[in-house]
Image (spheres, rainbow, N blue to C red):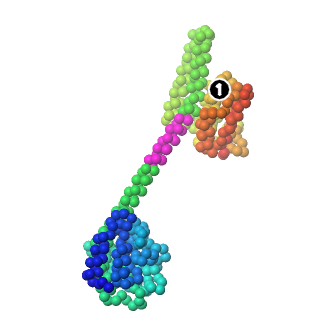
Amino acid sequence: MLIGSELVAQVLRRAVELPVTGPRGGDLTPLAELIGRRLDLPAVRLRMFVDSRPVDHTWPAGRGTPGGGGPGGGAPGGGAAAGGVFDGSAFDGGASGDVAFADVAFGGGPDGGPAAAWAIVYRGEEIGGLLVSTRAEHPVPARTHRALGDIAGALGAVLAAAAAQERRRAAADTCWQATARIADARTRAAADMESERHALERDLHDGAQLHLVSLQMAAAVVEHRLAAGELPGPDLHEALADLGARLERGHTLLVETAAGITPPLLRTAGLEPALAAALREAPGMALEVGRDVRSRRYPPPVESAVYFACLEAVSNAQKHASGASVRVRLHSTYQGLAFTVEDDGPGMNLSGAVWLRGPRDRLASVGGTLSVTSTPGAGTRICGVVPF
């Protein structure tokens, strides 16, 4: 059995040979094994404190390791093993020398005898300890006691270097996690921006389109009457003033929508006044609002979804069924807030109707659904419902 300075030298040489980086970097389990085998001990543990957290390197592997893991939270060959019963988490006064822990063994079992510990000090500070378990029911032999004391006295710089490696690994993990969080936040921010862009695109399409279509039809009527000589001076002046007012209202709507502002009437008065104002200039338009809907308010997202879905449906009725009568009806059912937009136009082919995606997505965002039926020569009927 090697003892004294010869064993200390062998332990230090082995410490120099240990890997500093990689999966085994900072693992002191080989030192615990060398000490255990050379001194014929059943169990050896090197414990170091990293930011007040105990990190253990135990030989043989599988011995109980309370209060901490191996390098990096459980390196191969050392580190935590569930079910450990060793309960010594501090050392007596920071001075080298054995500290008895009654008859508590590292992991229990027939080979577990009394446990003893030596503090490991570096530059006057206790940074860890050397803990051993013996086979017999009596204290550590004097010669082994002295050898363990010498080893503990020489391991200060080794444990300090291992603790620094553990801190470096923890800092690298923290840096990696922070980088991952930043990347995740950037991805989510990009997704949110894309979602906002699509929402703005839908609002511009669904809200402004009706006014622009109405303005286009009004301008076409003025052009036709001018060509037919049906607009004398006073009537022409009135027609141009009407077009100017429509342009101004369309401009205001575009500015408010681009700024993300809910139409003022919808925000302050609710669905009926907002739809009445928006549909006022649409020709052949009828709006019916049930008393149960007129007398109450709904959450802003619900009112906004139904409002824009109705405008989109009316706008498409004007484009695909020009000159047809259009009726918008709002009412409450056992399913929730419902609306119907129907026209008496020629009907349409619904296959590949891309425009339906907008109102469907809008209603789906508040848990609603949309259905469309169209019969040749009998018009189109669009129905939506939002549970509420």
User: SS for tag 1?
Assistant: helix
In which quadrant of the rendered view does residue 33 lie?
A: bottom left
Q: Residue at x 59, y 43 (%)?
A: 365
Q: Nearer the viewer, residue 28 or 317?
A: 28
In the rendered structure, the answer to whether residue 388 lies left or right of residue 99 reads right
Question: Does residue 198 show up magenta in the picture?
Answer: yes
Does residue 54 appear anywhere in the picture? no
Residue drawn 46% across the image and 47% down it: 187
Judge from the rendering whether residue 65 lies leftward or rightward of residue 35; answer left or right: right
Residue 1, quarter of picture: bottom left
Magenta residues, dominant SS class = helix
Q: Is residue 330 above or below residue 26?
A: above
Quick check: 334 above or below 27?
Answer: above
Q: Nearer the viewer, residue 158 or 24?
A: 24
Vertical placement of residue 282 versus 179, above or below: above
- What span is colored magenta in the figure? 185-203
Residue 119 pos. (x, y %): 33, 78
Which residue position is annotated with label 1? 320
Left/right placement of residue 162 relative to residue 379 reads left
Q: State yes or no: residue 291 in magenta.
A: no
Q: Residue at x 53, y 30 (%)?
A: 253
Q: Position of residue 112 (x, y in %)?
A: 44, 84
Asked whether residue 120 is in view, the answer is yes
With respect to residue 59, does 170 lie above or below? Answer: above
- Type of the residue with mark 1: His
